[in-house]
């Protein structure tokens, strides 16, 4: 699973080049693929590119940071959510706590 993040990003890029507009679910899947591949910076880049990220988008990005041991970034994302009118849920908090635990 971890090596498939490149394929996910390639498919996302292919969608946009074919004039398809990726849905939030599509973006979230790509962020999750980056998380599994321990590509936390790419996950953050995708989150920033999204027009309308949701709580799942942020949770996946927090998880990507958690897997990479980037607890300050994970906490920053958690604190950013209310600023963009999103409410963290249990999965988001669990990932952020786990990131702190691993530091």
Image: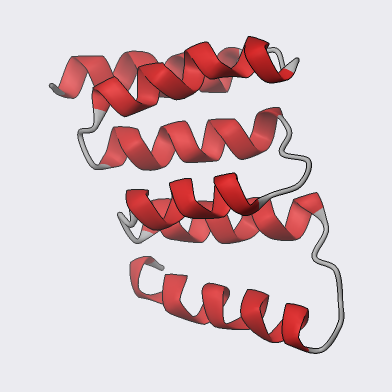
Question: Which one is in front, 37 or 40?
Answer: 40
In the picture, residue 18 is in which quadrant?
A: bottom right
At x 75% / y 78%, what residue is drawn?
16
* Position above or below: 41 against 84: below
* Position above or below: 102 against 2: above
Q: How is the image coloured?
A: secondary structure
The N terminus, quarter of image: bottom left
Q: Position of residue 15 (x, y in %)?
A: 75, 81
Q: Position of residue 14 (x, y in %)?
A: 68, 86
Residue extending farthest right: 20
Q: Position of residue 72 (x, y in %)?
A: 27, 21
* Position above or below: 102 against 38: above
* Position above or below: 27 against 15: above
Q: Position of residue 55 (x, y in %)?
A: 68, 28
The answer to whether any part of residue 88 appears in the image is no
At x 71% / y 39%, what residue is drawn?
53
Q: Horizontal placement of 99 versus 28: left or right?
A: left
Q: Horizontal placement of 42 versus 50: left or right?
A: left
At x 42% / y 35%, what residue is drawn?
63
In the picture, residue 103 is in which quadrant?
A: top left
Residue extending farthest left: 103
At x 55% / y 31%, what residue is drawn?
59
């Amino acid at each position: 699973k971890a090596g498939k993040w490149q394929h996910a990003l390639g498919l996302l890029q292919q969608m946009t080049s074919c004039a398809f507009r990726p849905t939030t679910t599509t973006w979230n899947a790509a962020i999750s693929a980056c998380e599994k591949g321990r590509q936390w910076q790419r996950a953050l880049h995708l989150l920033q590119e999204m027009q309308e990220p949701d709580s799942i988008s942020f949770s996946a990005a927090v998880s990507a940071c958690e897997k990479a041991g980037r607890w300050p970034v994970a906490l920053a994302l958690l604190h950013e959510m209310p600023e963009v009118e999103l409410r963290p849920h249990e999965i988001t908090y669990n990932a952020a706590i786990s990131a702190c635990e691993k530091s």
